[in-house]
Amino acid sequence: MSRLNNFSNVTASVVAQAADSFGTPVYLYDEGLIIEKCRKCVEMPHAYGLTARYAMKANSNRSLLKLITGAGLHLDASSLNEVIRAAIAGIPYERIMLTTQESYTGEQRKTLEDLLLRGLKYNACSLHQLRLIGDFATKNDISIGIRIHPGIGSGESATRNTGDDYSCFGIHLSDLNEAHLYADSLRETHKKGLEFKHIHVHIGSGADTEIWKQNIDLQLKIIEESLPNAETVSFGGGIKEARMPDEKAADITMLGNYAKQQTEGFYNKTGRKLKMEIEPGTYITANSGFAVMRLIDKKKTSRSNFIIADGGMEINSRPLLYGSKHPVYIVSSDGKTVVSSEFDPSGHNFTAVVAGKCCESGDCQTLDMDGHAVPRTMAEPQIGDIVVIGGVGAYCSSMAPYNYNSHQQAPEVLLTRENELKLIRKRQTLEQMLENEI
């Protein structure tokens, strides 16, 4: 078998079968790799209990949500619609935590209150959110978590840093005292205050390992000094995954051992045992995903060769948004061989920019952090060959501008552990794209 890389079960023949059976472009996911990543998360070392929550914004396909929760993970939702979407997939509300930028009033407020009564967990991410829900939560004896803005952060790019003072996520440390004052003020009405038992911090996606460890230390310090009722500490997500062969993934066992050591030290110092939570998204699904496309054209300028695929930014917008790097594979049109793989360099000297079909200069899969098109070295492909972009299992189908140029949302296919291809999202039709227009 001609595998695309050494960590996935996807082969050249599977890629060709997906292209022939479902058309291109198409997303292809590796069930076996997702299950293995889930196993590593639920087995992460811990001291006094662990809940691993999948950040469903990474990829919220119903089949994947069922697969991941079936492997033992709970869910982290970023909107009320994500909560409802997860519930439609059959995930109980008590296994879902809502941590959102949204502030709910009117009918949405009523929906949130109803779901809280049915077991949904909720993090207040601002003083305003806290005041909107505090009275209801106290009256109904519902515990509310809070997301803390720590003032330090890290991410794959500046726009993926969610913890420094240029991001707006959570209640800033300077407002923590005001949150306590509000929580205590509820005693006047309910004869009891609001206790913050779940404390959450997320510093960014693709966070530097050392800063992730610093966040653990900072969070425990904040809890010791300012949050006497805390029972659960969430260290967030952002666990770095390696999409490219020259990248180094975070060692989740090492991070777990460090968190275990620090929470045990916290117990020895304070007598308080804190349960741990993490919220991986990219780590779970990123490298399970491949965008399978056909090479439809070849062009050149005085500076560069271009290969044009029938999918691009409307399939994977991460290079355009973040300058993110994704591996490029070339598979022969008959699916017999992997002609070129960045995980198996073999002395090729052809270089080309990988472009899509959108009428947009930024529609390239090989951009740098400044938005410049950068050629990749590969075997020279032929029109009709299959172009595969790796690492697209997270933050690709879920946030792609798929109707740009009136292109249709691509289908999604799961390669099962039995080596069968299962359609988990149909290709959008033109009629579906237009049905809400008046």
Image: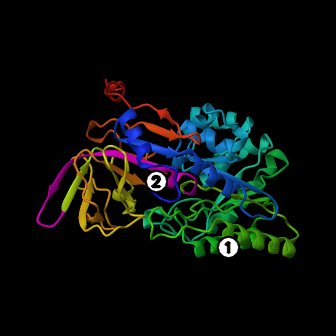
290 is within the stretch colored magenta: yes
Q: Which mark is residue 409?
A: none
User: Does residue 242 belong to the magenta stretch?
Assistant: no
Q: Is residue 61 left or right of residue 317?
A: right
Camera-nearest residue between 379 and 28: 379
Residue 249, image quadrant: bottom right
Question: How many dots with numbers?
Answer: 2
Q: Magenta segment, which residues?
A: 283-304
- Residues packed near mark 2 inside 10 Å, few (<14), some (14 to 19) or many (20 plus): some
In the image, what residue type sits under mark 1? Leu
Question: In terms of secondary structure, where does tag 2 sit?
Answer: loop
Residue 300 placement: quadrant = bottom left
210 or 66, which lies in front?
Answer: 66
Q: Position of residue 46 (x, y in %)?
A: 77, 64
Numbered circle sitting on residue 3: 2
Q: Which residue is mark 1?
A: 218
Disc with the residue nearer the chain's start (2 vs 1): 2
Element assignment for label 1: helix
Q: Quadrant of the image for the C terminus?
A: top left
Q: Is residue 393 visible?
A: no
Q: Write the residue at 61% across / 31% down.
A: 88
